[in-house]
Image (spheres, coloured by chain):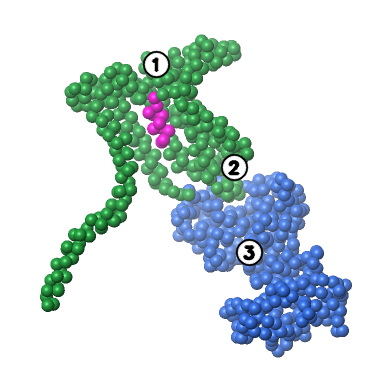
Amino acid sequence: MRSTTEARAQASPPVRRRAARLPAFASRKSTIALGMTLPLILIIGVLVLYPAGYAFYLALLSKSMDRFVGLANFDFLFRRETFWMVVKQSVIFAVSAVLFKALIGFLVAHCVHNVPARGQRKWRGMLLVPWVIPPAMSTLAWLWLFDPSYSAFNWLIQHAGGEGVPWLGDPYWARFAVILVNVWVGAPFFMIMYLAALKSVPEQLYEAAAIDGANWWQKLWYVTLPMMRNIIAITALFSLIVTFANFDIVRVLTNGGPVDQTHVFATWAFKLGIEGNDIPLGACVSLFMVPILAIAAIFILRDINRRGTEA
Amino acid sequence: MARVTLRKVVKRYDETLAVRGIDLDILDKEFVVLVGPSGCGKSTTLRMIAGLEDITDGEIIIDGETVNDVPPKDRDIAMVFQNYALYPHMTVYENMSFGLRLRRAPKEEIRTRVQDAAAILGIGELLERKPKQLSGGQRQRVAMGRAIVRDPKVFLFDEPLSNLDAKLRVQMRTEIKRVHQKVRTTTIYVTHDQIEAMTLADRVVVMNGGVIEQVGTPDELYHAPATRFVAEFIGSPAMNLVPCHLVETSSGLGLHLDDNLVLPVPADRIRRYQPYAGKSLLFGLRPEYMVERRVHTGPHQFDFEVLLEVIEPMGMDTFVHFLVNGMDVCARVNASAGARAGQRFTLCADLDHLHLIEHDSGKVL
């Protein structure tokens, strides 16, 4: 009698375990976590991974897209001078634009921060306008401002006794113009991010610093900047990515000219791929943004991680 | 170390007067506590001394120098804030040495001073940590350390213990007192907690509505309050205040509290209170001067019977509540006196400690 019950007891658990396996699997923490992140994984897969993979696949095809040519497109690009000029051009464009956006944003954020609360909303709203207007439209207005014969800028310069500047005709002035418009569009974003960061620094830290003997400059250097470091880094990274991939401003303002001197990756990829009917080569160019941005992102994010959440 | 003097100091924010012309003289090495309810102007006064707020009118003198227009960094003061205000991105060592580094003190000197201060506060092993890795009490110590390291003329404390839990608050209170006894720097301390004020201060400044109600040692404030506000504010549980009539009796003066209770005024006070005979006043007596009936030890003890409403055993003593003329009155009786709610009980009041307060002026007579 005893032996049969024992045998039954020993035999039954595996059966029960097998029956309970499915609900147990469903209620495991990792399963729930996977289920909850699945929509995001799907979105990233469809909207990021698939296009990226497809671009990479395209880059390995011949111009007529009927033949697999391996890395021949890359090899071709490396041996073209224009490619290296576009690389240099994109880096100069992105780095200098982000730098000036950050500087101007920081200065303006400080000014707005010191405006009494009542007037502050108005100023904040007005200063955000360049960022809110679709860049393609505002760039059109800039295009007219830069017109060599009828523009407001040259009119002013000529009335001041100077000589008109070929804003978009001269390579250096054209680069300057593209960067200027990009800074004009993007600086308000920095301003609003920095303003939020400034507001989150507790007033008492400044009071403590004042009592410790810090002057205006030392408060900025030892309190404000360290407290804003993470925001500054993230904003810069975000802006670097967006600026690097900029298309509309260059396209509307100079269309890469004069003589390809103002092309960045996106516009040149468009020119080669869509206008030049060589989609694999265009895809190949656009892929070059990835490693450059990835290196920048790794450095900036590692720094943020290392500091953690100090506040 | 220095003397701090306030002369007719006024602070006005737009339409409101936060501080209404206060005079105060704080001696060298003294520990002075500004205490009062929120909005009484105590923090504003401290911040004016620190230089964080402008002075609308009057004069503040630190160590013989008028500092009205001197910025905080040149006043040679150190301040401990309510929420510590430690720099979150700096280690404890960097936090404590920040003031000295800004003043370009030699590195070796900074190290010795930080280590000395850390030793006084027992935070030597925390020097490499960041503030977020510290507990509330440790942060409080670091904030104090930052003040001590500077060796300033004056320490200012702005409600430094209000963010700590009750147990830690008592511990840190003792700590602050110990540190002051060691470094002997003139200290001005702001709190709304009268127990903190009483336990820490050499002298307490009671403020209310932007004016100073009374300045005195804790003992003076407790036993000889100058105004009704001070009488009610200092002491826990608060002083009992009951409306009364000062009446002439066959043996002198009596305090008519209600029809069943007339207390005789002690003989040595009759001359003092005589001018107020016939007037309606407030009678004040602290709970500890009403106890269970005992053998009288003084000439002015008076027995009376009450109906107990509520009993609050505190362990060592028991607070008993009863009504006099509709007002709740509290007495402090021995735990073994057998007081029970709903019971008639005989209490003995020590009238040597009574206070009479004028209704209109709030002055203690």
Residue drawn 46% across and 41% down? A231
Residue under numbered circle 2: A215
SS category of the residue bearing label 1? loop
Nearest to the observer: residue A153 or residue A118: A118
Q: Are marks 2 and 1 on the same chain?
A: yes
Residue under numbered circle 1: A257
* Residue type beneath disc 3: Asp
Number of marks: 3
Chain under callout 1? A
- The label shown at residue A219 is none
Q: Which chain is blue?
A: B
Q: Is residue A306 above or below residue A245?
A: below
Residue under numbered circle 3: B193
The answer, for residue B102, to whether it is visible in the render is: yes
* Residue type beneath disc 2: Asn
Query: Which residues, given as a range, are shown in magenta?
Result: A237-247
* Residue A243 covered by magenta stretch: yes
Looking at the image, is mark 2 or mark 3 nearer the viewer?
Answer: 3
Looking at the image, is mark 2 or mark 1 nearer the viewer?
Answer: 1
Disc nearer the start of the sequence (2/1) = 2
Nearest to the observer: residue A296 or residue B110: A296
Chain under callout 3? B
